[in-house]
Image (cartoon, rainbow, N blue to C red):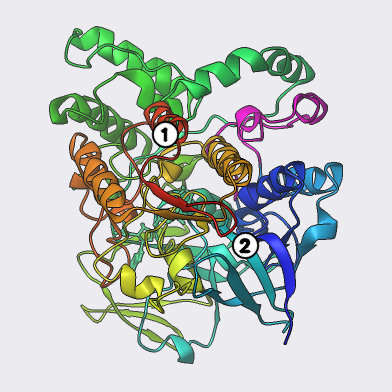
Amino acid sequence: MAHEEYDAVVIGAGFAGLYMLHRLRGLGMSAVVLERAGGVGGTWYWNRYPGARCDSESYYYCYSFDRGLEQEWTWTERYPRQPEIRAYLDHVADRFDLRRDIRLSTTVTGARADADGRGWTVTTDTGRDVHCRYLVTAVGCLSAANVPDLPGLADFAGRWFHTGAWPHDGVDVTGRRVGVVGTGSTGIQAIPVLAAQAAHLTVLQRTPNYSIPARNGPLGAGEADAYKADYARIREVQAGSTNGHPFVVNPQSALDVGDDERERVYRAAWERGGLRFRASYADLLADEAANATASDFIRDRIREVVADPATAEALLPHDHGFATKRPPIDTGYFETYNRDDVTLVDVRADPVEAVEPGGLRLRSGARHELDDLVFATGFDALTGPLLRLDPVGPDGTALSDAWRAGPRTYLGLAVSGFPNLFTVTGPFSPSVLTNMPTSIEHHVDWIAGCLEHLRATGRDRIEADPAAEHEWGEHNRAAAEATLLPRAASSWYLGANVPGKPAVFMPYAGGFARYVATCDDVARGGYRGFRLSGSRAAA
Ligand code: NA7
């Protein structure tokens, strides 16, 4: 059967897919976006759980590529709620007339490279299959839900949900006994909101977490005017940063200042709220003793907030340093444990043995009666969404075979053995260690520049060189090991949350600005580390 033909196919219509389509159109290329969901938004289409909002501040959790867009959109809160981000992405889709090339409710069921590596056939569940020269995955880092394989779940008499696939018309938990599994960023956002509505909330905690108060609030007209007038500077700071946030990291060591001074800096960061706490000192993620000063400070705040000493003790993280796992920010999280209708259960000490029709049974035999069970258990991060697609290269090798021992990529953007495939925010790109829209825009621009180069030089095939890929993998390992990040044994950055997943530190820890400089250098060097060839020009 003849397939529809495109220059490029993009999988996913979130931040990455929308902008990729816009750039492809700008290059005069024909393109289509295939999207599983019934609307645009990616992560923000699916994550509709109570309390869902972004941990980056709204004024920079957005695109920077269009000055008009920056000026006309006005954020209403310091941290945008899920519906507001979705409304923003809907606005972008309309403003740039993207919808006519987006196929919603279309799940990709397979992607197979042509034998000569100069194209891809992409099959879908609608039966409308497509063929393209270049395939771009814009599938997100946190889109493959991780639901624990608990015996008896199928027999649970109540309702159960994963936060990343939340029902669109909401879930009313009024008068119900709710259990929440997981205390990552999601659980920490959802728990206070669920507690306020449920008859009783049981939190099943495996690993206690640090969390910084978000200090969320409405953004007044004056504040919106101020950030809009300041965008040139804001974008410059982001571009030169380690993590895409417009914060300048205090260059001092936490160990080079006196105790009183350090306490003052941490207090100020605590009162200001948000992820910027990490920028308090330069070595918080590089030196264990420096990190311990921040970790101690936060543990003290938890002890201060939580009234019952035993509960406070159970909430204190001791197995990892602050921010070595993704640090959540919260609105009233620790305060929630002062409610009479909230119970904390340590499932590290006493794991869930089985789900029963009426609730959960722990290894000790203790039972928790529940009407609803909420899994805030995260995602098969970074590799999961790509392995779910499982593209097959020209020699018949599937990505799942190529990555059996763990992912390997060049710059997080390409995989050897998979020509003409680009992976936006793939493993070994800075991705989840950064403000995502900032990384996404960079990748999309880089890919667009690469496609332009291929066209201008008469090439139509590009593939990462295995040696360059290997070197990039080694550089990633070294960059991670220069930090404390790989020491957090239960981190999803390492894949530790998914049983059987190879333990590889997946996001690039060398910093956003350094990564961008490397990518620029690669492009300037004629796409060093890639093999480029053309069927029309001399290779
Ligand atoms: P996370 O950060 O992966 O958190 C998942 C939580 O669920 C975490 O506390 C896990 O404990 C816990 N978990 C996972 N599996 C289990 C099982 N089987 N039993 C008990 N507890 C479990 O996901 P989030 O959705 O909160 O956040 C993802 C990202 O979204 C976030 O970092 C932001 O970038 C936005 P563990 O720590 O693994 O012991």
Identify the residue at image location x=55%, y=72%: 161
Query: Which residues lie in the magenta part?
Result: 52-80
Residue 445 occupies which quadrant of the picture? top right
Of marks 2 and 1, the one in the foreground: 2
Residue farthest to the front?
538
> Is residue 356 within the magenta segment?
no
Q: Reply above or below: 162 against 261.
A: below
Residue 291 visible within the image: yes
Left or right, residue 156 beside residue 465: right
Q: In this picture, is 326 found above or below 56?
A: below
**Looking at the picture, does residue 274 appear above or below residue 532?**
above
Q: Is residue 236 left or right of residue 529?
A: right
The residue that disc 2 covers is 133
The answer to whether marks 2 and 1 mark residues whose Cβ atoms lie closer than 8 Å is no
Residue placed under numbered mark 1 in the picture: 212
Q: Position of residue 120 (x, y in %)?
A: 58, 70
